[in-house]
Image (cartoon, rainbow, N blue to C red):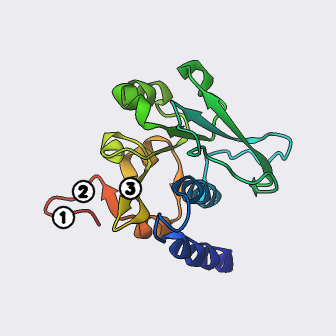
Amino acid sequence: MKKYILLFLFLLNAFMIDSDVMEESKLKSIFIYQIGKFTRWPQQTTDPDTPFVISIIGKTSPGSEIDIPGDKTIDNREILIRKISKLQEVPGSDVLFVTNSEAYRLETILDHIGNIPVLTFGDTEGFAERGVIVNFCIENNKLRFEINLEAVKKASLHLEFRLVKLAVRVFPQKKGSRGK
């Protein structure tokens, strides 16, 4: 397991490259896949017949879709990516990516999820502070991410501590700190 974590950390740092070099959506797809692999869900389903569901709520622009190759799995489960528009479609999701178009109702989405163990992602400034678990951001032309530890705890998920160390900002911030 340690060698897989080290390999992941190496790959993650390698992918923290200029967003001009690789399409941002491809980088986000890689991050979602890798972070998903290093997250533990309570009473995790390992039945290979049950897909690992990544749901996307909101509008995506052409070319910005999350795409993970069909041969990839998480916990020996085939990955299913689906677009949803209604909150009633969230149950059954292992991951929920909330797009910028849903910023106006982010709190409603997060309230609907409640304590359900769903790994939430976003890519909009302020989303991590507002309760999304992992929020992508661009810093110095590189794709990075922020983590909200209170949201992780609320969802009863466990992120590898090395992921938290790689985050550019961790919320909630301790008094007197700026980010990490």
The residue to which callout 1 is attached is: 177
| Label 3, residues with CA under 10 Å away: few <14, some 14-19, many ≥20 | some
Mark 1 or mark 3: name the one nearer the start of the chain: 3
Q: Secondary structure at mark 1?
A: loop
> Where's residue 101, x and y in %?
42, 31
Name the outermost residue toward the left.
176
Query: Residue at label 3?
Result: 137
Compared with 35, 16 (above or below) is below
Query: In the figure, residue 22 lies in which quadrant?
Result: bottom right
- Residue 28 x %, y %: 54, 55
Quadrant including the C terminus: bottom left
Residue in the foreground of this view, choosing between 69 and 86:
69
- Cβ atoms under marks 1 and 2 closer than 8 Å: yes
Residue type of the residue flagged with mark 2: Gln
Q: Nearer the viewer, mark 1 or mark 3?
A: 3
Q: Quadrant of residue 138?
A: bottom left
Give amino acid for label 1: Ser
Disc 3 to disc 2, how far (Cα)?
A: 17 Å
Q: CA distance from mark 1 to mark 3?
A: 19 Å
Q: In x, y percent, where is residue 40?
A: 61, 54
What residue did someone put label 2 on?
173
- Identify the mark nearer the N-term, 3 or 2: 3
| In the image, farthest residue toward the right | 49
